[in-house]
Amino acid sequence: MKYAFVFPGQGSQHIGMGKDLYENFGAARDVFQEVDEALHQDLYRLMVEGSDSELLLTVNAQPAIMSVSMAVIRVLEKEFGINIQNTVSYVAGHSLGEYSAACCAGVFDLESTAKLLRLRGELMQKAVPFGVGGMAAVLGLSIDDVDALVEACSDEKSFCVAANDNMQGQVVLSGHVSALQKALEIAPEFGARKAVMLAVSAPFHSPLMLPAVKPMAQALSRVCSSEPKIALISNVTAKPTQDKAEIITNLENQITGTVHWRETMACMADQNVTDIIEIGPSSVLSNMVKRSYKNIYTTSVNTKQTIEELANNL
């Protein structure tokens, strides 16, 4: 058996996430408390009792999703005695999930990861005035066809790019709303089965995020970091690395760069990974694996029952 742990990104949040972990495991409660203290916020209460609109805010969603992922990791380690570093061959995360992956691999501690994600959320939200940028999903096209589509929709004043290459036939665009609206109009001409705007507040993973890069790079350079104890597959390169400087550089570039998730899954398959386990409050990534690789076992882990099942298998 060869295991990889993957960590979800924004969009996987929902009210009530983490509650089952909090109620059943002291190690999970400790994680939520540490994150609350790091951010000087009652984030856990927001996660279980807040409004969808408040949790959707980037500054809240990013550290909240990470905290659920790391609560699962801490429970596996502290309450089931699983040595993650000796058990898992690779970690990866979708967008903000790469910070969760880096925390799991030991690059950042929990407090630093929470603070980095809070700052990342603030910077990415402020980078572009509200209403100027957005994101849209295009289904049924290859990445080459999507590249042709975005070229047809872009000019000197308005553009969009491929932001998330999630899987074959599922690509997310990001950029100016005007360019995205044009993309939706002409996508059927390129063979798209469906194209829809997404309910997000900013054009993530596009050049419009450039104002966030320098201050995020400065924050990453100041944070205490360690060499990873598990190979991390980067969104930017879709290749494994165990060099902390390379990981940090990739996290900087990730802000404006494409999330190469399709290539990340292909890398795991090429490395003969047998089990891809999604650690966090959704099953988005594991569902992608199921549709793309029938020979790789996958599941999502975010409750007492699923943790117990995973611990027994590990």
Image (cartoon, rainbow, N blue to C red):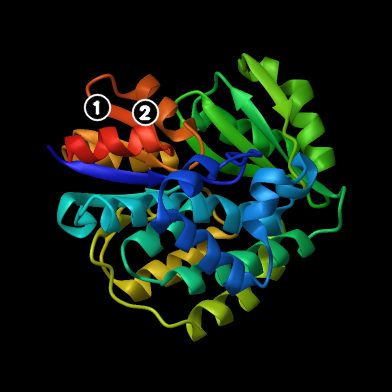
For the C terminus, give its image quadrant.
Answer: top left
Amino acid type at image mark 1? Ile
Q: Where is residue 137 in the image (x, y as percent from the top left)?
A: 65, 30
Q: Which mark is residue 184?
A: none
User: Which residue does the numbered mark 2 point to in the structure image?
Assistant: 289
Q: In which quarter of the image is residue 147?
A: top right
In primary-sequence order, the first of circles 2 and 1 is 2
Q: Marks 2 and 1, Cα distance to the nearest angstrom?
A: 8 Å
Q: Which residue is drawn at 26% across and 37% down?
A: 310
User: Which residue does the numbered mark 1 point to in the structure image?
Assistant: 296
Can residue 160 be seen here?
A: no
Q: Residue at x 23, y 34 (%)?
A: 275
Q: Which residue is drawn at 31% across and 57% down?
A: 232
Vertical placement of 232 versus 21: above or below?
below
Q: How many labels does the image show?
A: 2
* Towards the viewer: 70 or 297: 70
Vertical placement of 171 versus 246: above or below?
above
Would you say 22 lies left or right of 265 here? right
Q: Quadrant of residue 141?
A: top right
Q: Position of residue 298 (x, y in %)?
A: 31, 29
Would you say 237 lies left or right of 151 here? left
Amino acid type at image mark 2? Val
Q: Residues within 10 Å of mark 2 (few under 14, many from 20)?
A: many
* Towards the viewer: 258 or 56: 56
Q: How crowded is mark 1: few (under 14 residues within 10 Å), some or many (20 or more)?
A: some
* Towards the viewer: 212 or 17: 17
Vertical placement of 116 versus 307: above or below?
below
Q: Where is residue 204 in the image (x, y as percent from the top left)?
A: 66, 51
Which residue is farthest left?
Answer: 1
Q: Is mark 1 on a helix, strand or loop?
A: loop
Q: Residue at x 51, y 56 (%)?
A: 67
For the N terminus, give its image quadrant.
Answer: top left
